[in-house]
Image (tube, grey):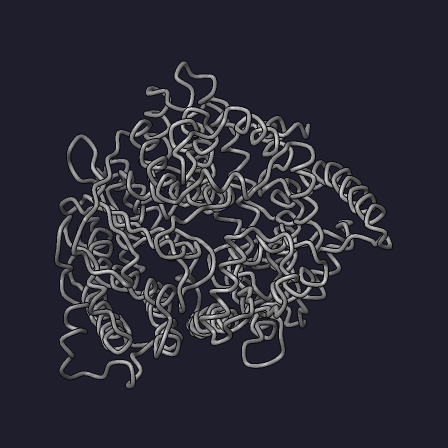
Amino acid sequence: MSDRGAGVPADLGAPGALSPDARALLAPWPGPCGGLPPFDRATPAALAEALPHAVAARRRAVRALADSAEPPTFDNTVAALESGARALRDLHAAAMSVASTASVGDMPGVAQRLAPLVPALELEIAHDRALFARVDAVWRARHAAGLDAQQRRLVEVLHRRLLRAGAALDDAAQARLRAIDARLAVLRSRFDQNLLAEQSGQVTWFTEEAELDGLPPAQRQAAAEAARARGRAGAWAIPNQRPAVWPFLQHANRREGREAVWRLWNGRGANPGPHDNRPLVAEILQLRGERARLLGAPSHAHWVLADRMAGHPDCALATLHRTWASVLAATQRQVADYQALADAEADVAGRPRHALAPWDRLHLAERLRRQRFDIDSGQVMQYLSLERMLEAMFWAAGRVHGLEFAALQGVPVLHPAVRVFEVRRDGAPIGVLYLDLFQRPGKMHGSHQHRLRAAESFEGRVLPVSSIVSGVPPPAEGRPALLPWEYANVLFHEFGHALHMLLDGARYPSLGSLQVAWDLVELPSLLNEYWLRDRELLRRFARHHETGEPMPEALIDRLEASLRADRIFSVQLDYLGAAIVDLELHLRADGSGRAIDAVAVERQVLERLGMPACWDLVLHVAHSVHCFAGGYDAGLYGYLWSDLMAADVAEAFAAAPGGLYDERFARAWREAILSAGHSVPADAAFRGLLGRDPDPAALMRRFGLQ
């Protein structure tokens, strides 16, 4: 293997003695269940030593494999590549976990310096001609080599991955591709760190309690505690974080306060200064376009979707636009209802009428929900304590998949609030689940599931390790954490991703759950949300945090009606608009070199679509972590794609004798999707479950949008 491409920067790990913490990070993980990450040793300094050392070790091992004189076979080439990736993959996953949940002190700078190393090495490996010649030889002989189905699939997946990374390009194109990917890794990390740094210091201040009129006592107390923590006892602070912002926009009666909170929230990532993400977005789009052109695709969107179920941007856009047309009509009726409510309230109060603005929408939706369905989100929260929802989540997984969850004590964690569970099936451990659910400084906003270790069984059984990260506001001492319905739903959603990992039955990590086509990856998580809406589950676990009384049947009835009227994330204009903007931007990322003003494109697309003036996007380009720091570039449409499939699968569950808990269909779901991972193509996996392609009308039927 050549020495071209990423070397190890001298300041990130020159040869020599390593510190004890760095050595601990590089050693096999200690502890139960095959070992767990030594987070107690994962200091910024130790990571800055250990990761470059692991990169260098991986480089040497792959070079030896590429230079081998042995004729290439599945075992000495493909399986050897898979086996040799393990140590670096696990260390990198632990490092990324620290960077996203404990980004304090030196960690933001270290994270940005480490970010390019692994992507650059992966490209270097893909561009080694001797190595690709060996993989290509195995690929050409795969049908005559006596390989089983998973082995052939692994050969095909690895071969395609190398080609998509530029293995067949000439030297100059490969060199440019490596430079682009190294720069993109830096930009993605900086995008994320910019938002984290900016939001951690942003609050909207209120000095008069009357300005919080309408805010429930729990949120009012949280605002007072947030101000006190910032040295301003007697004032109130709304941190610029979703768990604080959304309840304020829902409940606060004063428009001026809602506008101030909304503008701070809406503008994150787009403020002039050191944390402005707009220049980063422009550069990311340029580089993605150039990269796509090098790889022979008309645009970044074309390159991405060639490896997805959708196959082509036109297919994804057509699905989005069809759904937009159905949802727009329903949304326009909602807007008319909101305006009528706002006008009536203005008339009663003797105030001038006003046209609706984006900071009015959540507030009026909450008021209308109370008026039509007698549903108060604050009332519903009283029945949704975090502990009860965790019990519900684990109970449902036990009923459907036969899983048990046992707390593990004494495991190293990044914060004392993190909990760790051994996951068992039939009395034997099958994996480990970390729950990191509370807000704290240095923690990335939002919720996600993170892989700490992939399942595998080709060289002995390795148990998967999954982590669910969220941003629930810590409750006052001695009080339970109460969840808005949305947060309980997010918890079940991310747990669906975790189940996909924990039940992964693929033999090889490259065929595991996180390797599936990215427009299938949300299917397990979106389907898992259905169990939260199950009446039997709500009767058992939705109990008042003070009295222990179950949620009244009448309240469940009204909640169901409200949820159907409100619809879910993927059939809302705020998501659909963001998904269309994402694809439009990445279609413009075509390598032509023309400047792309992402904010202007976003505005133009929304005007063309006819987005109502009082509506807003859930993700604007300057803070779209999904598209510019995560893996959803040209792929935000995947939530709708997966929700179409989830509605179809949910109808099949509902038609089974046992409903959501039907043992036979649950086994089929587990075997065809959750356990299969990437062992079969995504469309074949779905057909293996239902015997046909997905029926997109299922989602429309669910909400009466046919």
Residue 292 in view of the camera: yes
**Which picture quadrant has residue 335?**
top right
Quarter holding residue 545: top left
- In the rendered view of the protein, which quadrant contains the N terminus? bottom left
**Is residue 342 left or right of 245 when viewed as pictured?**
right
Q: Is residue 590 visible?
A: no
x, y percentage for residue 605? 73, 56
Quarter-wise, where is residue 682 in the image?
Answer: top left
226 versus 536 height, above or below: below
Q: Position of residue 80 (x, y in %)?
A: 20, 55
For image coordinates 61% across by 37% down, the residue present is 567
Place of residue 313 in the rendered image (x, y in percent of width and height, measured from the top left):
61, 48
Residue 672 is situated, as x and y percent measured from the top left of the image, at 36, 30
For the image shown, how many numbered marks are present on the structure? 0
Q: Is residue 442 left or right of residue 312?
A: left
Is residue 202 left or right of 103 when viewed as pictured? right
Q: Residue pushed farthest top?
A: 657
Q: Looking at this view, is 544 or 188 the one in front?
A: 544
